[in-house]
Structure formats: C-alpha cells, structure tokens
Image: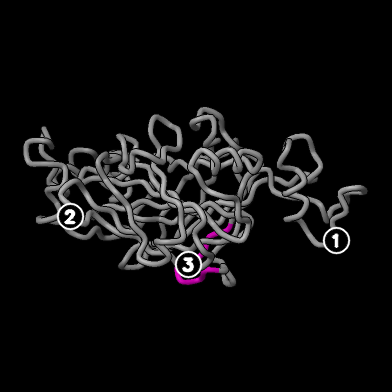
Amino acid sequence: MKTTLICATLGLSLGGCAQVLDIPDDPEVVGRWRCLSEPPPTPVPSATTAQVRVQACDFMRQCSVRVSDLTARLCLQLDPFCTNPIAEGIQDVDGLMTFSVPTPLMGFNGYLDVMSSMELCTDPIFGDFGPTMCQMASPECNPEAPTEACLVPVYARGLLFFNPRVYNDVEEPMQLPLIPAAAIPTMLQAAGAQLDPTKGNLFVTALDCDGRPASGVTYSLKDNAESVTQLYVHEGQPNRTDLVTDESGVGGFLGVPAGFANVIGYNEDRETVGEAGVTAAQFTMTYTAIAPF
C-alpha cells in the first residue's frame, strides 16, 4: 500500500489527498509520524458501497508470480467463522479479485477469506511435506488409495483484514502474498518455529502517516505473546534476529492460537503507531496492516 492507495481509499486525487491528510512536499520535514499528535480527519464514504481489488501473488517468489484459481468470501470482522458471509463465490481473474464492500459511516473493516485450488496430498507438488498434508486431510483419507478425501489446498488459506478501513473505491489493487503449503515447513524452520497445524500465523505491515510501509517498527501481541514465534521480513526473507521492520514494514507471528488476536505497533520512540484486531485460524495465514489513521 502506498500513498496512492490511501488516496484512492479516501476517494481523492493525489493533490486533494495531500491536502486532506496534510502531507507536505517533503514529509520528512515534519516527520513521518506527525499524525500521531495531529491525526487527519476521518474520511466520509461517498456511496453505500465501495469497490475493492485484491491481487494474489506467491510470497516465496517475492510476489513476482501471480496466484490464480482462487475462491473467496467476504466476512464481517466480528464473525470469526464467517457463518454469515456478506458475499460468497468471489472468483479471481489471473489472481485479481474484484468485489464490493458495504461502507456505512464508519467504513468497512471486515476480511476476505481466500482459498486456493486443491490437489491430492500425494501429489509431488507437496514434496516431503506430503505425508503431513495427508494427516491434515480428512480422517477418511487413505494415502495408499487417495480419493477426494485426500484433497488439500495448494496454498495456505489466507484471511486479509481491511485495516485501515475501506471508505471509498480502491483503484490500486491490494497485494495478498499467499504462501505455498509445501513451503511452510521451510519458512517455519528459517524462523526457528515448529510446525503446529492447529495454530495460525499472522503477518502485519506497518504504514506511516503518508500510507507508506514503515521501517523501524516493532510488533507485540496483547495475548499469547509468550507462546508465539516472532519474525520480521528483511529483503524478502524471514528474519528472526533483527526484530524490527525494514523498509517493507512487514513482520509477524508464527504459532498463533486460533481465535481473536490483537497486534500493536510501536515506532523507534516506543510510541504506539496503530493496532488491529484480527482472527487467527489453524493452518491459516492472516494478513493485516496497522496505521495511525
């Protein structure tokens, strides 16, 4: 997400957005966290719905490859199991999903629940992780004679939480970096974590007052902080030693117990730059952003 995306979310041109958000010609003159003391006005929806576009891509290939053959549903933030979806059967076109969200006076802060195509757990695509995937499949799955009961997702399920809230049409697609199921053990090993299919994983992007990814941010969970493994993405790779964001603003937690999770971001001065409430689910990647607006 960049300034153009924030402006599009506010339904403004770049010039108008700069005026509303009070963005100077050189933001560093007054500081990228200036809005912590002078927050911008709350946007006002221009219609009862807003169009959103989400582009899915392969995380392990640093999003240079699009991920397609997806199905998604739109859910309310306080509906963790999406028992009453706002919309179902959302399909992608070359990885791009386009849909509308309701925008009442407070905007939309729900989430998109994304599932990839399925393959038999015995398929070579899963490599050495295949036997584990078979164990995670239906109890009726027999790897010796695989049937539909042995179907598992090629990419881990993704929950994309909309934070900041959506108020107006989002013209620049939001990026959703999905993680291949076969790559999860390697990613966990790199981060020093153990595979636990009953738990979820949370990735967060920090945005500054201009809507740009922010370096120098650290994250914490309000609950279960002792039981998770924290990591930050540096130069596109998981990093467990430098526990602060680089210019990508991306960090997260592995092994998050299923249920509600609240993440908080702090800048170099230990000021709170934002927080977000999301849902973690077993063998699922939850994505969100935190921003001071």
Looking at the rendering, which quadrant does residue 15 occupy?
Answer: top left
Q: Residue at x 26, y 57 (%)?
A: 274
Q: Which residue reaches farthest right? A: 145
Numbered range of the magenta stretch: 73-80
Local packing at callout 2 (Cα closer than 10 Å; few below 14, some 14-19, many 20+) is few
Please report whichever mark, 2 or 3, sits nearer to the chain's N-terminal start.
Answer: 3
Circle 2: residue type:
Glu
Residue 17: which numbered mark, if any? none
- Which residue is denoted by mark 3 in the rendering? 76
**Magenta highlight on residue 65:** no
Which of pointers 2 and 3 indicates the residue nearer the eye?
2
- Amino acid at circle 1: Glu
Image quadrant containing the C terminus:
bottom left
The residue indicated by pointer 1 is 140
Corner quadrant of residue 109: bottom left
Residue 271: which numbered mark, if any?
2
Badge 2 marks a residue whose secondary structure is loop
**In contact (CB < 8 Å): disc 1 and disc 2:** no
Note whether 212 is above or below 39 in the view shown.
Answer: above
